[in-house]
Image (spheres, rainbow, N blue to C red):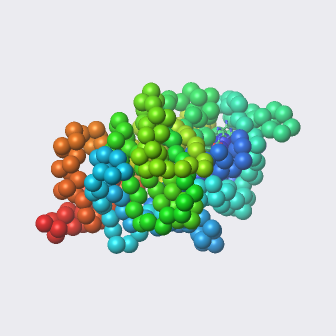
Amino acid sequence: MRDFVVVGAGPAGSRFARGAAERGHDVLVLEQGEVGRPLACSGHVSLDIWEYVPDEARDDLFQNAIHGARFHLGGADSPAHPFYRDEPISNAIDRVGLDKTLAQAAADAGADVRDHHTVTTVEEHRESVTVTARGPDGLERFESRLVVGADGPRSRVREQCGLPEPDEFLHGVLGFDPEPDHQEFVDVHLTVPTFFAWRIPRGDAGVEYGLAVRPGDDAKARFSALLDDYDADLCERCSGLIPVGPPKRVTGKRSLLVGDAAAQTKPFTGGGILYGMRAADHATRVVDPARPETVGDYEDAWRSELRTEQRLGHLVRAGYSFPESLQELGMRAFSGKIGVHMDEPSTLFSREQLKALLSWG
Ligand SMILES: Cc1cc2nc3c(=O)[nH]c(=O)nc-3n(C[C@H](O)[C@H](O)[C@H](O)COP(=O)(O)OP(=O)(O)OC[C@H]3O[C@@H](n4cnc5c(N)ncnc54)[C@H](O)[C@@H]3O)c2cc1C
């Protein structure tokens, strides 16, 4: 019997698998397709990402250094309110390459990573879990002490284990214009309901355009309008769901969810790569497969790390729906040099940030 079957080799699943294998556990990872594909993510991350990947992968994954964001209340030609730092705040990275790198790190640590295995059912028993997957040779059954659902926003493990759904799903769309762009600013447009549209310069990899809205808010038409506005010529498009607002419970008798399956995302950007990996680290630290009740310690640990940031993230997002006059005032007051960490909205309310605000007068 395995110690853990991990469903999904995205950032959260591979991070968990690596950590658990390093602790000497017997770990099997099942990924439904090719690792990293299909792409449905901007790969715009804080510099913390480099703590999670081997040093030698850095040059291959890096695409562009971002120093700040230009906020707009209108389209491409509307006035820009820049927020920035002298040094880089974030990087655009090769997201497909990231997934492959993290899965390889898990395999190097001893995890058995199998792609082209789609998990169809999960049965929690008293002494074990049975995970059934459709692979190249037909249906296969795997016995494990615990199952880890790292299978993204529409988690099969969550559904099979009867765990509750996240509060909300946003529909994200994005596309790439191959024209190289090495600018240091992303553009953020508060022109779609309850969220935003974006433009990310990705160095030699081109420019990315994207937006996210609630289902029913016509992502397709709004995306066409954004592309027309910028006169963008796309070579590739994709879309995906962004879960926002974690369910009340992300653990069962012999199951736990990590990453998007548990809605471990930033409510004000939809980003989940780093939150999911931070939560996965808590899981590997506290969950003992021989003592399934330790999943409760994971439930406490990840919430105490991310709860405040997620609550503040909701507050920041509420600002996207303020009346335009209020947004204009806020932009004028706050734009300029900032001291914030993009994964930690609490830094918006920090003493350093306050000092910086006062010093600009
Ligand atoms: C448009 C868009 C833009 C985004 N931009 C950013 C960004 O710039 N920065 C950021 O931090 N986050 C961003 N995100 C969010 C980010 O993509 C997710 O938070 C992140 O991918 C979550 O990682 P994960 O490992 O939990 O899930 P995923 O990356 O979704 O990985 C889940 C894996 O499970 C596999 N899987 C699913 N079902 C099964 C099954 N039944 N059997 C086997 N395998 C299965 C999938 O194939 C997938 O490989 C964006 C999301 C969207 C939609």
Q: How many marks?
A: 0
Q: In which quarter of the image is ligand 1?
A: top right
Q: Is residue 172 above or below residue 356?
A: above
Q: Is residue 102 above or below residue 243?
A: below
Residue at the extreme right = 137
Residue at 65% x, 50% y is 36
The answer to whether any part of residue 279 appears in the image is: no
Residue at 50% x, 29% y is 164
* In-front residue for pair 20/330: 330
* In-front residue for pair 156/69: 69
Q: Where is residue 35 in the image (x, y as percent from the top left)?
A: 69, 50
Left or right of 110? Residue 81 is left
Q: Quadrant of the N terminus?
A: top right
Residue at 78% x, 34% y is 134
Q: Position of residue 293 (x, y in %)?
A: 55, 40
The answer to whether any part of residue 232 appears in the image is: yes
Q: In which quarter of the image is the C terminus?
A: bottom left
